[in-house]
Amino acid sequence: MLSVLLPNLLIFSAIILFLYYMIVLVKENKINRKQNEETQQLLREILKEVKNKDSK
């Protein structure tokens, strides 16, 4: 009984750890994407200001 249960528990725990790791990666990816979008927006605004100053 135990010889069947332990490998199954090991496989199950490996699957759970893998799923947890993937969820963490997805959350980090969403955070990074949001930060990248914010940075791009700031850079666009800075570029507009620089262009406006150059044209004056």
Image (tube, rainbow, N blue to C red):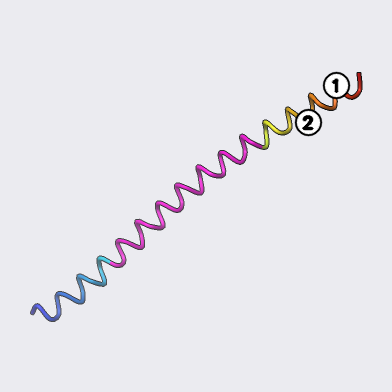
State the SS at label 2.
helix
- Badge 1 is on which residue? 53
Which quadrant would residue 48 be assigned to in this image? top right
Q: Main secondary structure of the magenta part?
A: helix
Q: Which mark is residue 41?
A: none
Q: Work out whether mark 2 precedes mark 1 in sequence or the reverse, and give the earlier one.
A: 2
* Crowd around label 1: few <14 · some 14–19 · many ≥20 (10 Å): few
Vertical relation: 34 (above or below) 3: above
State the SS at label 1.
helix
Vertical relation: 23 (above or below) 7: above
- In percent of width and height, residue 39 lies at 64, 36
**Position of residue 33 in the picture relative to residue 56 (left or right):** left
Q: Mark 2 belongs to which amino acid?
A: Leu
Q: Mark 1 belongs to which amino acid?
A: Lys
Residue placed farthest to the left in the image?
1
Vertical relation: 47 (above or below) 15: above
- The quadrant of the image that shows the N terminus is bottom left
- Badge 2 is on which residue? 47
What's the residue at 71%, 33% (across, down)? Answer: 43
Vertical relation: 56 (above or below) 9: above
What's the residue at 29%, 61% (across, down)? Answer: 16
Q: Which residues are the magenta region?
A: 14-39
What's the residue at 31%, 66% (across, down)? Answer: 15
- In percent of width and height, residue 51 lies at 85, 27
**Position of residue 49 in the picture relative to residue 5 (left or right):** right
Marks 2 and 1, Cα distance to the nearest angstrom? Answer: 10 Å
- In percent of width and height, residue 25 lies at 45, 53
* Crowd around label 2: few <14 · some 14–19 · many ≥20 (10 Å): few
What's the residue at 91%, 18% (across, down)? Answer: 56
